[in-house]
């Protein structure tokens, strides 16, 4: 399992390790990176590395713009996810943003699941 954390989601990630999941983190803030490392998680610098590390990517992001950045921008998940992978998006974003992301990932053969 791979995750894009924000600091308040660290407890969810900590629960994943005892269940036997490898957790790899891509964090945008120094605070989240430090928390991830303090909890023993691996960290990658690029979203492509994140996609290469997992079948499922769980994302907790603040808003529509952040979702668009991690998926649609150059180097984003739409470029690096492959058929069979899943983006599990845990945030409350708009239906329009979700539809755009679902379309981009479907073009790559990847699935998008909203679970706010």
Image (tube, grey):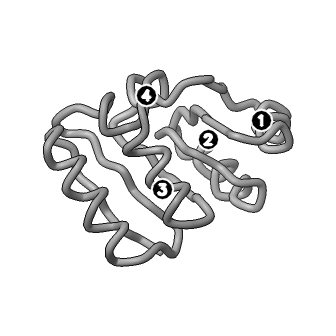
Residue 114: x %, y % from top left = 36, 68
Residue 70: x %, y % from top left = 48, 44
The crowd level at tag 3 (other Cα within 10 Å; few <14, some 14-19, many 20+) is many
- Residue that badge 4 annotates: 75
Whether residue 20 sits left or right of residue 82 in the image: it is right
The crowd level at tag 4 (other Cα within 10 Å; few <14, some 14-19, many 20+) is some
Label 1 – label 4 distance at C-alpha? 19 Å
The crowd level at tag 2 (other Cα within 10 Å; few <14, some 14-19, many 20+) is some
Please give the label number shown on residue 17.
Answer: 2
- Nearest to the eye among marks 4 and 2: give it: 4
Q: Nearer the viewer, residue 82 or 75?
A: 75
- Residue that badge 1 annotates: 33
Residue 50: x %, y % from top left = 48, 29
**Identity of the residue drawn at 17% across and 38% down:** 108
Determine the secondary structure under disc 2: loop
**Identity of the residue drawn at 79% across and 38% down:** 39
Determine the secondary structure under disc 1: helix
- Residue 38: quarter of image: top right
- Residue that badge 3 annotates: 67
- Residue 41: quarter of image: top right
Label 3 – label 2 distance at C-alpha? 25 Å
First in sequence, mark 2 or 1: give its number. Answer: 2
First in sequence, mark 3 or 1: give its number. Answer: 1
- Nearest to the eye among marks 3 and 1: give it: 3
Q: Nearer the viewer, residue 62 or 74?
A: 74
Label 2 – label 1 distance at C-alpha? 17 Å
Label 4 – label 2 distance at C-alpha? 28 Å
Q: Is 84 drawn above or below residue 66 in the view shown?
A: above
């Amino acid at each position: 399992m791979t995750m894009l954390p924000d600091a308040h989601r660290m407890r969810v990630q900590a629960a994943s390790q005892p269940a036997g999941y490898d957790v790899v983190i891509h964090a945008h803030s120094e605070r989240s990176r430090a928390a991830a490392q303090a909890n023993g998680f691996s960290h990658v610098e690029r979203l492509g590395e994140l996609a290469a590390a997992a079948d499922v990517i769980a994302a907790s992001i603040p808003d529509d713009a952040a979702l668009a950045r991690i998926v649609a921008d150059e180097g984003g998940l739409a470029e690096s996810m492959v058929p069979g992978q899943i983006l599990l998006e845990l945030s409350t974003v708009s239906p329009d943003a979700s539809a755009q992301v679902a379309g981009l990932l479907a073009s790559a053969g990847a699935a998008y699941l909203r679970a706010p």
